Amino acid sequence: MSGIFDTRIEFLKGVGPQKAELLNKELNIFSYGDLLQHYPFRYEDRTQFFKIRELRDDLENVQVIARIKSVELVGTGGKKRLVAQVFDDTGEMEMTWFKGIQWVQKKLPVGAAYIFFGKPAQYGRKWSMAHPEMEPVTAANEKRNNFQPVYSTTEKLKARFLDSKGISKILEQLVPLVYSQIPETLSPEILHQYQLIGKAEAVRQIHFPSSPELLHRARKRLKFEEFFYLQLRLLLMKVARTEKFRGQILANTDLLTDFYKNHIPFELTNAQKRVIRESFADMKSGKQMNRLIQGDVGSGKTMVAFICMLIAISSGAQACLMAPTEILANQHYEGLKEYAEMMGLKIALLTGSVKKSARRIIHEELLSGELKILIGTHALLEDVVQFQNLGLAIVDEQHRFGVAQRAKLWAKNKEFIPHVLVMTATPIPRTLAMTLYGDLDVSVIDELPAGRKPISTVHRYDKDRLKVFGFINQEIQKGRQVYIVYPLIEESETLDLKNLMDGFESIARAFPQYHLSIVHGGMKAEDKDFEMQRFIKGETQIMVATTVIEVGVNVPNASVMIIENAERFGLSQLHQLRGRVGRGAEQSYCILMSKYELSKDSRIRLETMVRTTDGFEIADVDLRLRGPGDLMGTQQSGITDLLIADLSKDAPILTLARDAAQLLLANDPELQRPENTAILRQVKQQKKTAMNWSRIS
Ligand code: ADP
Ligand code: MG
């Protein structure tokens, strides 16, 4: 918004320089436009009245119409309070006041009817409200029809009469003043097709709803708009990039054919085949590939990665794979080495712990083109690592990497930006994927290799530990291996570490006949690796670890995952951990250990894990419990600076908005048609004001 919307807030009647300064500081409101977009975060429903019998624990503030039966002062000194017994035709309840008693007392004549507004609470069998708002019942207010907006504000603002009501008052000045100048930002087609109300009306209704229906439509319209421009921006970025960056044409399949014919150890799943086809189509298209491969744990992403590498190498290019930790890089290396050697391809591992002399050889062979596949950690990103012709860069477990690092990979080939595959096992709900990765193409491996038995998951309390130990013993007797995982978070690191060590000792005492490995973040990389290798080789039967084993680690013979203090883990973490088992032919088990007392959220998390192994279902629950910001970490939080739309709740609107944006660009890619001028203007405007999107993608 520009023009009048840039007017500084202090020029608004009823604001003035002092309040303006506070609004600047406390709420980042500088201009008329900012104030207009300070949308209420909820509404108090003053349209509905509750009967006393209808009150429930889970209700927020509600209205009750009741008559006063008696009023009395109870208690003495600090505990003195005023209690009014009130009633309607369904029952009786209490209204209580601890402060302002004398003043309230005068307003409470026995027999009078009032509208009381507050949060109901139950003590014993009796309902009560503390410090309710109240007003006498009149013919008018009994039937009124309004939703009162509630604005976020701060203590400092409240002290200057800018509480929620105060903010509403200044908006009462502003909205009529600018109403006729609020520009429409969507095209007539879109308004019509999606049955959206106009922008100006939406802004008015959002602050001063005249009915629940109109409020609903106003919110829908503004959410739609917000999602629409977010999606449009992402799609435009994608278009710009596809046009700007040519891709190396990688179309030769000789190696692939050889591999399929002579070496592949198992039949690919249909999902794997499909994703390979999608990637191959990109790689031979002449355009640079930017593809996200989502595949639940165990879906076989590594094989897909290897086959894409073969395509690149067949066409004379090199490939690299970057993993977030040394353990993972190691494991990828071990896994891929076997395949690469079958194919006579040179492969190397580059991590922080590779010796200088070995590094030098890697650097040389990369430059000469002799080394075809490089696996590693961040060490790959260093400037000294130069390829003869890097054709494909694969990033595993993307959520651990910053976007800037993705960009660094791009710079590894001066002539053609390498094709990029991002692989993630974090099932991202569709809504989030659309937004976070709106600029990437997405492939999903939505099928597990045949013959996998679903992991059986149970929840056990700490008191059942002996039984659990018995079960561990029984499984090891059958020749299996067991993970026991402890939480370790930075904030309570010392305590957690002690917990882990205590656990380790008690397990060592309980199972003197077995060998144990231990791995945690505080250990040196080579020690971790040593312990890990012992477990992989089957020299140890029990692996006691923190979440460092969370991603990617693959030991098919390990079939039991015990998670200690499971209530402290997030859902996606639990899912990742569980994914470490169930990789072989044996029936696998996941046992979630927790204390007896659990918060509501913890209980939902554990119940969800027991109920399902579907990563997407789990991700959806997670999104609902945690909200989107948290799910993505701080890195990308800028993307979700949404004013009114909510990624976890407004998925249907997001889908509509994305469709609309796609359709628009399909019909008018340059936004040149007259009916789309408003949209073009808005896009340009946002480009100026919004942060620099191209930098972070
Ligand atoms: P993730 O997607 O979690 O990275 P992996 O690539 O580690 O999964 O694969 C998990 C296990 O499944 C590995 O042992 C792998 O060899 C095996 N695997 C992958 N694809 C298939 C398939 N099509 N059929 C049978 N086993 C497979
Ligand atoms: Mg993997």
Image: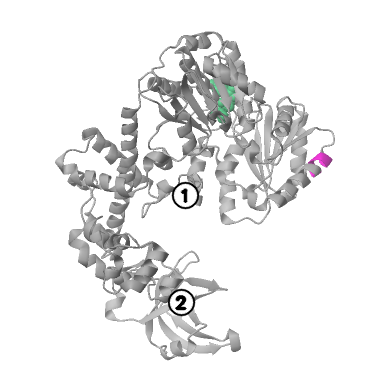
**Quadrant position of residue 155:** bottom left
Q: Secondary structure at mark 1?
A: helix
Q: Main secondary structure of the magenta part?
A: helix
Residue occupied by mark 1: 629
Residue 449 seen in the current view: no
Residue 509 part of the magenta segment: yes
The x and y percentages for residue 395 are 51, 30
Residue 571 seen in the current view: yes
278 vs 667, left or right, is right
The x and y percentages for residue 325 are 61, 34
Q: How many marks?
A: 2
Identify the residue shown where x is 57% and y is 34%. 324
Q: Nearer the viewer, mark 1 or mark 2?
A: 1
119 vs 328, left or right, is left
Front-lying residue, 559 or 458:
559
Residue occupied by mark 2: 91
